């Protein structure tokens, strides 16, 4: 998939040292914090980001940053220097996106089912009509992983249970299931160590203890093995040939 | 009793702190359906982005996002054409969501008895939307060229990219032949670019076009490029009735790219 360009704010001074002579610059980002609605937001975003990068799923890149009251997650602003793109809310647009970005759509559906992200609606930015711009990016992973349910423990149980969790998805009914199976296999065959490394921060991250991080890693490893069967049960119903919204 | 047409201005917010809004469209709805008009809208419903791009520095660099929003509003109109009551909350939500495009307050006009809703909408858009600026007068060729080069990553950092390149061919038994190109990408395959700004007399144009054609033909003849990788970057294709003698040699160049306007040019790589 083509790399997604991120926006520079300002280019500052250029270093005279080194062969590459780097330039200092600033970039725009959206800051996300833990909150009542998403008490593990920062951790969720970081894990989802790392998993997506490991698997090459098209999500916006972000970093953990330090604020006066602790860590926050800074999701880098994509492409546009200031004009936000519309959300993907209309069926006609979803169909166009699914036609234009079949690989990305399949990757996203597989990834969302894997991490239990039931909140993908309106959290995809995609360029639909501008032919010269290739842009498909998933944003916002505050409601998945440890925040699937009201409590982290319940969320982990649901991940391990083999439950679909993602009962609605904007691309259910519009996904090429042949490509979806390839992405599911990619996730299922991912080395366990990579999943663990994505979950384990080496230290507590806000309210997420090291113990909870290990528990999430274990839950994802169990879900990883079950993913092909989970998808297999719904594959027929979510295929693009139906071109209609599906809810389970 | 005259028919009613409800309408809301579609406004672009460039700066959320100042809350300065610019009218960039109109959405109107009534018994005859939902109608949309946008800044820069052409007769074939395509959008000329040049007017939007002139609003601010932000819009200048990101005019293509306006196309995406236009599409979004058109999908909205299609989705709610039979359910206009549900349209209002969706439009209201744009402001709540911090969207750069919002719908102003709803107003209503009477459609005169002998008029159609379509005519009323056209009148509204003429009244509410700023006139599109004359593209010809404000067109900056250098700027358009730089934007085109950026958009297609024809930049110094690109591997094999060269500017103002002179290429020499040394056929056996003949004198060396030199050609000059404005840009080139020396890679597998090679590509060459010549730039032509359409201005001046027909005679001047013809001479320039013939030089360009000759350059390309020599490059192809000596195996440096294929015909498909010869690109002419120009600002507009001359209308046949105005510059007939120029279009004939131009037709021999297979890849003529119009760099004017944000929406007209596809990426060529």
Image (tube, rainbow, N blue to C red):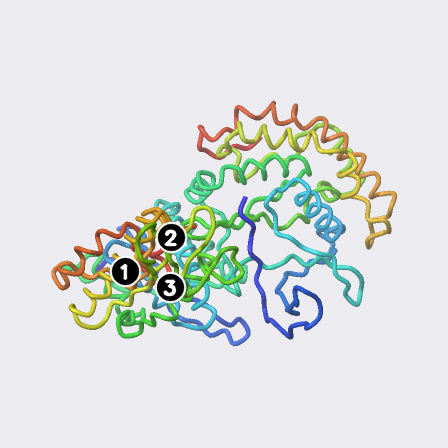
Disc 2 + disc 3, Cβ < 8 Å: no
Residue at mark 3: chain: B
Q: Position of residue A106 (x, y in %)?
A: 55, 35
Q: Which mark is residue B266?
A: 2
Q: Residue at x 42, y 50 (%)?
A: B190
Measured in 3D between alpha carbons, the distance from the residue under mark 2 to the one under mark 1, in whole angstroms, is 22 Å
Sequence-wise first label, 2 or 1: 1
The residue nearer to you, when weighing B72 against B4, is B72
Circle 1 residue: B212
Neighbours of disc 1 within 10 Å: few (<14), some (14-19), many (20+)? many
Quadrant of the snapshot with the N terminus of chain B: bottom left
Residue B164 showing in the rendered view = yes
Neighbours of disc 3 within 10 Å: few (<14), some (14-19), many (20+)? some
- Asked if A236 appears above or below A137 in the picture, the reply is above
Q: Position of residue A154 (x, y in %)?
A: 78, 37
The residue nearer to you, when weighing B240 against A132, is B240
Q: Residue at x 26, y 71 (%)?
A: B136
Residue at mark 1: chain: B
Q: Secondary structure at mark 3?
A: strand
- Asked if B34 appears above or below B103 in the picture, the reply is above
Single out the mark in the foreground, 2 or 1: 1
Circle 3 residue: B182
| Image mark count | 3
Q: Position of residue B258 (x, y in %)?
A: 31, 59
Q: Secondary structure at mark 2?
A: loop
């Amino acid at each position: 998939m083509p790399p997604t360009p991120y926006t520079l704010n300002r280019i500052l001074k250029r270093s005279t040292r080194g062969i590459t002579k780097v330039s200092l610059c600033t970039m725009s980002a959206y800051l996300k914090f833990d909150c009542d609605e998403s008490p593990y937001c920062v951790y969720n975003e970081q894990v989802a980001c790392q998993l997506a990068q490991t698997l090459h799923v098209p999500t916006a890149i972000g970093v953990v940053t330090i604020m006066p009251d602790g860590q926050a997650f800074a999701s880098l602003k994509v492409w546009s220097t200031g004009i936000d793109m519309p959300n993907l809310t209309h069926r006609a647009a979803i169909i166009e996106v699914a036609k234009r970005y079949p690989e990305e759509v399949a990757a996203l559906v597989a990834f969302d089912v894997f991490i239990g992200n039931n909140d993908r609606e309106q959290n995809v930015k995609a360029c639909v009509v501008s032919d010269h711009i290739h842009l498909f990016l998933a944003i916002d992973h505050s409601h998945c992983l440890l925040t699937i349910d009201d409590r982290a423990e319940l969320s982990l149980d649901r991940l391990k249970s083999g439950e679909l969790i993602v009962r609605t998805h904007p691309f259910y009914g519009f996904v090429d299931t042949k490509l979806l199976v390839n992405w599911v296999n990619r996730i299922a065959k991912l080395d366990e160590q990579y999943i663990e490394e994505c979950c384990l921060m080496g230290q507590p991250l806000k309210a997420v203890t090291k113990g909870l991080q290990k528990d999430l890693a274990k839950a994802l490893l169990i879900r990883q093995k079950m993913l092909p069967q989970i998808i297999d049960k719904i594959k027929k119903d979510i295929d693009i040939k139906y071109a209609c919204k599906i809810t389970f | 009793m005259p028919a009613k047409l409800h309408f809301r201005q579609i406004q672009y917010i460039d700066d959320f702190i100042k809350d300065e809004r610019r009218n960039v469209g109109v959405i109107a709805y009534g018994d005859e359906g939902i109608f949309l008009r946008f800044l820069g809208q052409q007769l074939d419903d395509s959008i000329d982005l040049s007017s939007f791009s002139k609003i601010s520095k932000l819009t200048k660099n990101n005019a293509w996002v306006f196309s995406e929003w236009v599409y979004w509003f058109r999908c909205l109109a299609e989705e709610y054409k039979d359910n206009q009551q549900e349209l209002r909350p969706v439009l209201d939500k744009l402001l709540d969501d911090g969207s750069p495009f919002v719908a102003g307050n709803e107003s209503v006009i009477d459609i005169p008895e002998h008029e159609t809703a379509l005519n009323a909408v056209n009148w509204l858009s003429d009244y509410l939307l700023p006139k599109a600026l004359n593209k010809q007068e404000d067109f900056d060729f250098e700027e358009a060229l730089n934007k085109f080069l950026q958009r297609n990553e024809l930049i110094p950092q690109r591997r094999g990219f060269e500017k103002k390149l002179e290429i020499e061919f040394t056929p056996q038994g003949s004198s060396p032949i030199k050609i000059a190109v404005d840009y080139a990408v020396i890679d597998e395959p090679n590509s060459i670019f010549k730039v032509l700004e359409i201005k001046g007399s027909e005679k001047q144009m013809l001479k320039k076009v013939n030089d360009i054609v000759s350059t390309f033909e020599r490059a192809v003849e000596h195996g440096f490029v294929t015909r498909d990788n010869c690109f002419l970057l120009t600002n507009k294709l001359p209308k046949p009735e105005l510059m007939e003698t120029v279009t004939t040699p131009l037709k021999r160049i297979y890849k003529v790219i119009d760099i004017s306007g944000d929406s007209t040019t596809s990426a060529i790589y």
